[in-house]
Amino acid sequence: MVVWNPWHGCQKKSPGCAHCYVYRRDAQYDKDSRIVTQTKSFCLPVQKNRKGSWKLQGPGPIYTCMTSDFFIEEADAWRKEAWKFIQIRQDLEFFIITKRIERFYVGLPADWGEGYGNVTVCATCENQKMADERIPILLEVPLQHRAVIHEPLLEEINIFSYLLSGKIEQVICGGESGEQARVCHYDWVLALRRQCQINRVSFSFRQTGARFLKDGRLYSVPRKYQITQAQKALLDVHFEQKK
């Protein structure tokens, strides 16, 4: 996975943030995750090496702002320049996951139009309440590519009516990691998968999380197996994107 973190630090916003992996990692170094700072990698997309080639390369999407939120208030002064880097690098696909889709328009480029073709914005919705708050906004803002992520998946979620719009290209879900992880139910994962299959939306089960309930049995899954066990379930489905 290729990552670009233009800034670091975030404010907890909703139930899915309770056991944030960024906070856990920063705590190991006595770092305050609530302080949002621009990183040394801010200009990475437009930096070149000695041979004149871009330093930031694919393949695959560039996961953007994974230790913060691209639309967080504290980064308002930097976002226009970050968008400029994304616009310059049309050869790359940028994947932006956010809990702040309501702030989408703050700092939006003047040439945005219906969206840059190399940008996917993904709303993260850990429960039904957040899905019902965030997905309608995601569907209304001008984007060429949209996705939804339910991670950590904290309860059974129904997004069928939103998938009917035909605007969501991908749904991702997964359990919660860490010692305080809340339980993820296999039935919740299957319910989301069925909704996606019916609506021909690509689906990915990314990780089991640390505590996974399947067929009435609660499993404690070590961190190193959480992704591989999800892959072994063979639940991922892919549908070609609509043109």
Image: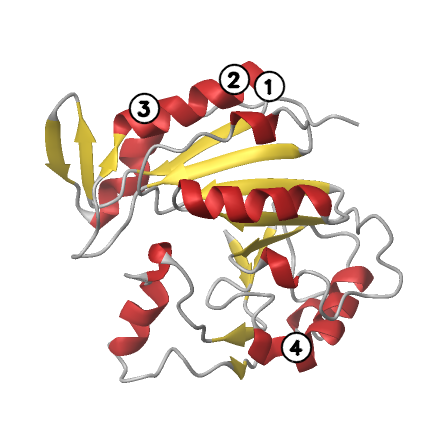
According to the picture, the residue beneath numbered tag 4 turns out to be: 76
Q: Residue at x 57, y 34 (%)?
A: 170
**Which amino acid type is shown beneath numbered disc 4?**
Asp
Relative to residue 152, is residue 123 drawn left or right?
right
Mark number displayed over residue 231: none
Q: Is residue 140 left or right of residue 192?
A: right
Kindly state the secondary structure of the residue where label 4 is placed: helix
User: On the rendered image, what quadrant is the C terminus found in?
Assistant: top right
Q: Nearer the viewer, mark 1 or mark 3?
A: 1
Residue 200 image label = 1
Q: Residues within 10 Å of mark 4 (few under 14, many from 20)?
A: some
Q: CA distance from mark 2 to mark 3?
A: 16 Å
Q: Is residue 90 above or below residue 229?
A: below
Front position among marks 4 and 3? 4
Tell me the residue at 59%/41% (across/down).
147
Q: Amino acid at mark 2?
A: Gln
Badge 1 density bin: few <14, some 14–19, many ≥20, Cα 10 Å:
many
| Residue at the spot 89% in from the left edge and 61% down from the top edge | 111
Q: Marks 4 and 3, Cα distance to the nearest angstrom?
A: 41 Å
Sequence-first disc among 1 and 3: 1
